[in-house]
Amino acid sequence: MSLRQSDSFGSTVWKLVKFIWIGVLGATLYAAITTIAVRLGGEPQLSSLLSYGLLVPFIYMLHSRFSFESKAAHRTAFPRYIVVQATALSLSFLLPPLLSPLFGGANAVLFIAIAVIISAMNFLASLMWAFAAPGK
């Protein structure tokens, strides 16, 4: 199914804009919660993991209701969203060693490229699968 078949192009662009804004909100909340947890004595890796885990349901609801205005049942959409998130986490672990030779030590550029790749994959998987209309 192409993007034009599932939605009008303008509607898809608007969903992308909302997806980006909610992503920025999620990243900001993650950074704030993790920073506060570490300042209160939490171990950085555990604080990061717990912050991420706490935000997943909240960000899911925002994407479901606002980014994608999904009609899919939560019992279907939420497990799919978890699969999308697990795939993104896996890619964030696997892509740096695979792509770093292409960037010649320019780590900032490498990580920006990885963020763009993963964000694009998240958007498309969410649009076409996780939050797709029932029966798709």
Image: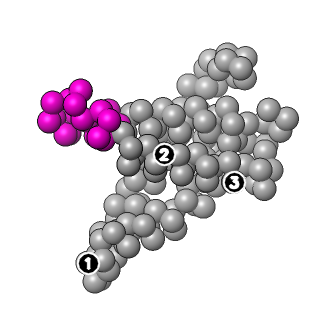
Q: Magenta span covers which residues?
A: 96-114
Q: First in sequence, mark 2 or 1: give its number.
A: 1
**Is residue 75 rendered to the left or right of residue 21?**
right
In the depicted structure, whether residue 27 falls above or below residue 14: below
Image-based side of 84 in relation to 31, left or right: right
Mark 3, residue position: 79
Residue 25 visible (yes or no): no
Looking at the rendered structure, the kind of residue marked 1 is: Arg
Report whether 35 appears left or right of 121. Answer: left
Element marked by disc 2: helix
Q: Main secondary structure of the magenta part?
A: helix
Q: CA distance from mark 2 to mark 3?
A: 14 Å
Q: CA distance from mark 2 to mark 1?
A: 27 Å
- Name the mark on residue 88: 2
Q: Which residue is mark 1?
A: 39
Quadrant, the N terminus = top right
